[in-house]
Amino acid sequence: MSLMSHTGHTKRAARLGAALLFACCLAFASADAQHAAPTILKVEPPNWWADHSINPVRVLIRGRNLSGARVEVRGAGLRASRVSTNAAGTYLFADVTVAPHAAPGVRTLRLSTPGGVSEAPFEISAPLARAGRFQGFTTDDVIYLIMTDRFSDGDSSNDDPDVSRGLYDRTKTRYYHGGDFQGVINHLSYLRDLGVTAIWLTPWYDNVNHLNEREQYPDKPGGAREPITDYHGYGAVDYYGVEEHFGSMNDLRRLVDEAHRNGIKVIQDEVANHTGPYHPWNVEGAPTATWYNGTQARHLANNFQTWVLHDPHALPQLKRTVLEGWFVDILPDMNQHDPEAARYEIQNTLWWIGMTGVDAIRQDTWQYVPDSFWRDWTAAVKREYPHVNVVGEVLDGDVAHTSFYQGGRARFDRIDTGLDTLFDFPLLYPVRRAFAEGKPLREAVQIVSYDHLYPNPSVLLPLIGNHDMPRFMSEPGADVAGLKLAETLVMTMRGTPQLYYGDEIAMRGAGDPDNRRDFPGGWAGDAHNAFDTGARTPEERDAFDRLRLLGRLRRELEPLRRGALVNLYVAEQQWAYARKTERDAVVVAFNNDAKPATFVCDARPTGLAEGTRLSDRLSASQSVSVADGKLAITLPARSAAIFAASGR
């Protein structure tokens, strides 16, 4: 035998010995795990209700050494069944049935294995009173989007919490700035004065307690990429936790109650499509093998080619990339075809509604989730909370694409998702082009002409901006005159208007995160306080006063909230439409030209009687009267009018 051959045999023997040693270690470790006591780290949900439409509730327990565990209940009114665990013994599922009319109170879930016993509390909760809660929003409402971290710091004690030190720094655009639930509570009277009747808060799920190293962006344009925080709320690591920078669950419930006392509804922002990259499911291992679409090591990257989802010529693989791909190749994509994952998400939505008393849901990234899941999800929401409604985010300017997702009819896939309404992004883009850049207003009218594609266009949410795009005032050519025109259209158009915090004072802001600046005056010591009427600049006062007037007119003039939309006159830079109910009509007119304009429109479709005198409630135009079934309207350059019968 040669030296080389002898050496080769020696190496093989060594490798074989190492492999046997490793296998023995695994066997001993496995045996140790089998004999170790189970450990419970988290129970989701931690509580449920008697006489709920979901019963049993599927409970997910995260822990260690859970394989083979038996689940018993200590206390009356609960029963556990259908127990299963994942291969690693780190997650356990159990059906927990709540007896009819079971008394509220804490019970105990007892897990036992040959290695020992572990217990965790599980509560049967008293349901919140339904009166004044779970209301849904309607076209009578005005919705105001608040990025909680950037609106107002009402409680400095949670700026830099012990569990997540070092993430607060107002000088860094992607760190926490201190805005919280108390800051919103402190300014509910400001919102009520503006005419706001519903607030949409960005997600309040608990986020990771350290810097997000996986998503890195420059703090300033042109700067080096660096870690960020998930101040925005879209990086959940705990779907049953509240972000400590914003406050506690008690603070959140107090915010909802205070808002309701002020006549303001609350809309929760939910994210079913994906989790944050640091969620334990992604870091430690998922509850099931198919919980996510792929794994951290092996997954599709989303290409955002959403049009393929209803393209009759698209290959299934093209659709998979959109429905299963991870956002920015980082955010783990939930697999709603996994029945356990789907059940978890449905229950989570119902838990938040039941725990807080919110009125509606804004669902993020709607189009990236299978329609079959949405059908089941919306049905579950409506069964328990019939008045709670949902607005889905389909961020696209194509009417044919966007309208596809509104519920009310089955599409080619024979699925009606039941989605109540959508943001009117297709209208947003031509409105911004017209009133900021001076492009033809006719383009906006053309978008509205496609309303027939929606099952119910009357409930859409018109808007001019949100937290995912540059602010209106940072559009090329934008000024306060254009802002006032755009907001006049949004506040008088069919549907429910959605405003973005700070637009009422003409805040600027380029792309993310510059479009998420702190509201001036929301922090003690701010040099400027735009919450204070007397401290506003002339520009801020001009913008605010117009929007507040529009809010008041919506309250006073029923047709602006509930009337059918009737186009009366359309030209390149002029548009007049009526909002008409059986009892009354209001005429809204725009001149987006750089010079005055006079035009005549047919008044007969409004139902206004001959000789009816209409005054402009915006004071831009002289009063007009119906003469020979027509209205002759003269408007100054770049102005709008809201004509209502005198005395109304």
Image (cartoon, rainbow, N blue to C red):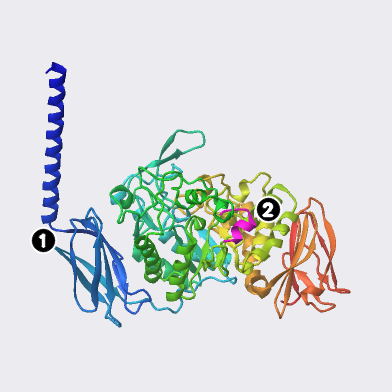
Residue 424 is at least partly visible in this image: yes
Please rate how many residues cluster around mark 2, counting C-alpha atoms within 10 Å: few if below 14, some from 14 to 19, many from 20. many
Residue bounds of the magenta highlight: 395-404
Query: Horizontal and vertical percent for residue 579?
Result: 71, 71
> Disc 2 or 1, which lies upstream in sequence?
1
Name the residue tied to disc 1: 114
Front-most of residues 186 and 533: 186
Front-most of residues 67 and 42: 67
Query: Horizontal and vertical percent for residue 296?
Result: 35, 45
- Residue 430: mark in rendering: 2
Please determine whether, in this image, residue 193 is positioned above or below residue 278: below
Alpha-carbon span between mark 2 and mark 1: 67 Å
Please rate how many residues cluster around mark 1, counting C-alpha atoms within 10 Å: few if below 14, some from 14 to 19, many from 20. few
Relative horizontal placement of residue 555, taking residue 234 as reference (left or right): right
Q: What element carries label 2?
A: helix
Identify the residue at image location x=59%, y=61%: 404
What amino acid type is highlighted by mark number 2?
Pro
Relative horizontal placement of residue 474, taking residue 103 as reference (left or right): right
Query: Horizontal and vertical percent for residue 22?
Result: 14, 39
Q: In which quarter of the image is residue 484?
A: bottom right
